[in-house]
Image (cartoon, rainbow, N blue to C red):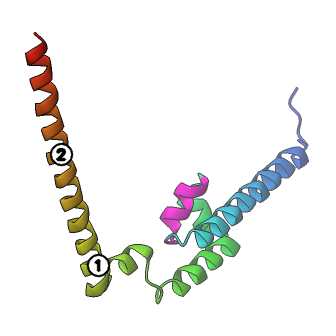
């Protein structure tokens, strides 16, 4: 005997709860991405929160939010681009400090080699 009037209310309620839970995860992921200044697009959001891109495209609320955030980021430069545009003066300062460090390490290396020679001489004399 088959049930000719099935009750789908539990199934529909579960699907609705699951959808709301995923929307909350996507919202949290978007906040986290904004805070960390990550690139926001459908692919990165889907990877960040573990949902399919199809879900993001089908859900109008999420789709519109992602598109708006993506448009807001068009004018902004990413941290990688900012790092790439370091001024020549800052690069020169880094180069000078690294050269100073190299000379300091070379002199320390020479001193240690001299101490090693002296210690080897003492060991050789004691034999």
Confirm whether the magenta stretch covers residue 43.
yes
Q: Residue at x 16, y 53 (%)?
A: 106
Q: Which mark is residue 14?
A: none
Label 2 to label 1: alpha-carbon separation: 27 Å
Determine which residue is flagged by label 2: 111
The part of the chain drawn in magenta is 39-49
Residue 69 position (above or below residue 117): below
Q: Is residue 44 left or right of residue 1?
A: left
Front-lying residue, 127 or 112: 127
Label 2 environment density (alpha carbons within 10 Å; few <14, some 14–19, many ≥20): few
Instruction: Give the percent coordinates (x, y) of residue 22.
Output: 71, 56
Give SS at disc 2: helix
Residue 120 position (above or below residue 4): above
Instruction: Give the percent coordinates (x, y) of residue 13.
Output: 86, 51
Number of numbered markers: 2
The C terminus is located in which quarter?
A: top left
Q: Residue lying furthest bottom in this view?
A: 75
Residue 24 position (above or below residue 118): below
Q: Is residue 101 left or right of residue 75?
A: left
Q: Earlier in the sequence, mark 2 or mark 1?
A: 1
Front-lying residue, 2 or 83: 83
Q: Is residue 127 left or right of residue 46?
A: left
Front-lying residue, 97 or 31: 97
Q: Residue at x 60, y 83 (%)?
A: 68
Q: Which mark is residue 93?
A: 1
Confirm whether the magenta stretch covers residue 58.
no
Q: Is residue 35 left or right of residue 25?
A: left
Instruction: Give the percent coordinates (x, y) of residue 18.
Output: 77, 51
**Of marks 2 and 1, the one in the foreground:** 2
Instruction: Give the percent coordinates (x, y) of residue 91.
Output: 27, 78
Q: Would you identify the image quadrant in which residue 121 lies?
A: top left
């Amino acid at each position: 005997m088959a049930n000719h009037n099935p009750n789908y209310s539990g199934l529909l309620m579960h699907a609705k709860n699951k959808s709301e839970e995923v929307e909350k995860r996507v919202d949290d992921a978007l906040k986290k991405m904004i805070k960390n200044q990550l690139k926001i697009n459908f692919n990165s959001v889907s990877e960040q929160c573990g949902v399919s891109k199809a879900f993001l495209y089908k859900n109008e609320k999420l789709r519109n939010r992602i598109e708006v955030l993506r448009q807001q980021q068009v004018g902004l430069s990413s941290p990688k681009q900012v790092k790439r545009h370091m001024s020549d003066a800052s690069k020169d300062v880094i180069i000078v400090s690294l050269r100073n460090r190299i000379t300091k390490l070379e002199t320390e290396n020479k001193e240690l080699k001299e101490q090693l020679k002296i210690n080897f001489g003492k060991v050789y004399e004691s034999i």
